[in-house]
Image (cartoon, coloured by chain):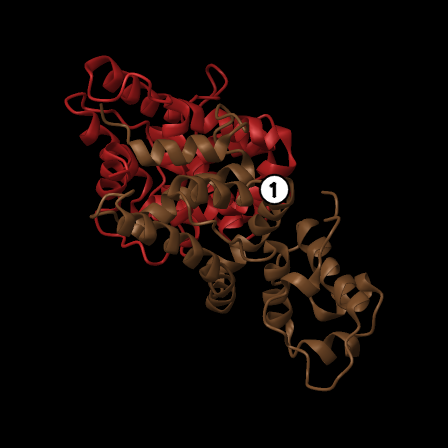
Chain colours: A brown, B red
Amino acid sequence: MEPMTTVSVHESAGQDRKAPGRPRNAQADQAIIQAVFDLLSSGQSADAVSIEAVAAKAGVGKATIYRRWPNKEALLVDAVAAMKGPLPEPVGDSVRDDLIMLISAMRNKRMEHYGKITMCLLPEIAKSPEMRRIYQGVIEPRREVMRGVLRRGIATGELRADLDVELTLLMLSGPAAMQNMVHWNPQVPEDDFAEHLVDAILRGAAA
Amino acid sequence: MEPMTTVSVHESAGQDRKAPGRPRNAQADQAIIQAVFDLLSSGQSADAVSIEAVAAKAGVGKATIYRRWPNKEALLVDAVAAMKGPLPEPVGDSVRDDLIMLISAMRNKRMEHYGKITMCLLPEIAKSPEMRRIYQGVIEPRREVMRGVLRRGIATGELRADLDVELTLLMLSGPAAMQNMVHWNPQVPEDDFAEHLVDAILRGAAA
C-alpha cells in the first residue's frame, strides 16, 4: 500500500494535546502520524504497534512522542482523526446534495486508503473496548454531522417524519465502508456511487 | 473469542473435494475446519495460517489435510463455506419476508462469530487477488440467492421496475456486515434489525 501523500496534522488532528507553552514541532508530529499509518497499512495490528516502533519508523526519539502524546491510545486517536481529515460541512440547501457530499467524502482516493487502514484496526476495535471507545470518539462527530442533515430533512419535510435516523446513518455509511474496504460487491460501479446510493435510499425499492 | 460450537462439514462444506473412492474421515475433517476457525478467530491472518499450524491445532498429520485438500486455498474455501452454513432457501411468497429471512440468517449468533472471522480475513482479501477470488467464490452463490429474490420482486411488481439490483444487494448486506463485525452504529438496536432494514429499503427515506 502506498503511503498517504498529505497528512496535515495542523488542520485535522482535532483536539490539541500540546502542553501549554511547549513549542511544537509540526514536522516531527507529521512524521510520527505518518509512521502510525505506515505501520497499520503494512498490516500490523493496532495492538502490535508500539511507541518504540513508531519512533523508529518516524526517525525520532520516544521522548519526542511522549512529549506530545501521553500514551499510545492518545496517539491513535490523533492518527485516526488526521486520517479522517477535517469535519465536512454540509451546505444546507438540499438534503440530497448534502448526503451525496458526505458519502463522496468517504469515497475519495484518500478515504480508500483510509478504508484499508480501518480494516487493519477493525480486529482491535472488536477485541478492545478501549480501541472501540477511541474509534467511536473519532467517528461520532462525523456521524453527528450526517445526523444533523437527516434531522434537518425531517424538519423541512424533505424526509419522511417517521424516519429512523440511526438506521439511515448505517444504511448510508455501511455500504460505503464495505466498498471502501474490499469492494464488497464488485458489480456495483464506482462512478457516481454516492449519488446512486443516496437516491436509492431516498426513493425506496418498493414499486 | 469462543469457538464455534457446531460446524457440520457434511451439511455445509459445499463442493465435495474428496477424491473418488477415498474413505472420508468426517471427524478429522471437522477438527481441521475447526482448527482453521480457531486460528483465524485468535486474530491470526489468513496469510499466516499454515497447513502445519492447522495440523498441529487439529491434532492430525499434514498428510491427513493434504489427502482431502490440495492446498491451503482449497482448505480456506471449504472453511469459509462451512462457516457460512447451507445456502438459504427463500420461500417465494413475499419478497419482504424472503429478504428479512436472508438478512436474519446473516445476523444470528453463529454469523456474529463468523463476522469476526471475516474481519480477520478482510486484510488478506484486500491484499491478495487469490483470497479475493476465493471469498467471492463463496459469497457469490449466496448473493445469487438474494439477487433471485429481488428479480422475482421486480417481475411480480412488488419492487420498482427500474430497481438497481446490485446496489440493493449492497444496501442489504453492507449494513448487516458492518453491524456483525464491529457493531458499527451502536445506536441501532439488534432487535428486529433485519425487519427494520428491509422495510427502510423498501419504503425509502423521502417524504
SS of the residue under disc 1: helix
The percent coordinates of residue A193 (x first, y second) are 49, 32
Q: Is residue A95 left or right of residue A57?
A: left
Query: Residue shown at 42%/45% (left/top)?
Result: A93
Rendering quarter of residue A12: bottom right
Q: Mark 1 = which residue?
A: A112
Rendering quarter of residue B169: top left
Residue most extreme to the front: A93
Query: Residue shown at 74%/43% (left/top)?
Result: A2
Q: Nearer the viewer, residue B144 or A177?
A: A177
Residue most extreme to the bottom: A21
Looking at the picture, which amino acid does disc 1 mark? Glu
Q: Is residue A10 above or below residue B93?
A: below
Rendering quarter of residue A112: top right
Mark 1 residue crowding within 10 angstroms, few (<14) / some (14–19) / many (20+)? some
The percent coordinates of residue A173 (x first, y second) are 44, 45
Q: Which chain does tag 1 point to?
A: A
Q: Nearer the viewer, residue B23 or A94?
A: A94
Using the rendered image of the protein, determine whether residue B49 is visible from the camera's viewpoint.
Answer: yes
Residue most extreme to the left: B93
Q: Is residue B84 above or below residue B38?
A: above
Q: Is residue B144 left or right of residue B63?
A: left
Query: Residue shown at 40%/36% (left/top)?
Result: A198
User: For the N terminus of chain A, which image quadrant?
Assistant: top right
Q: Is residue B14 above or below residue A117?
A: above
Q: Is residue A167 left or right of residue A58?
A: left
User: For the C terminus of chain A, which image quadrant?
Assistant: top left
The percent coordinates of residue A125 (x first, y second) are 50, 59
Q: Nearer the viewer, residue B20 or A169?
A: A169
Residue most extreme to the right: A59
Exactly how many numbered labels are in the figure? 1
Q: Nearer the viewer, residue A172 or A40?
A: A172
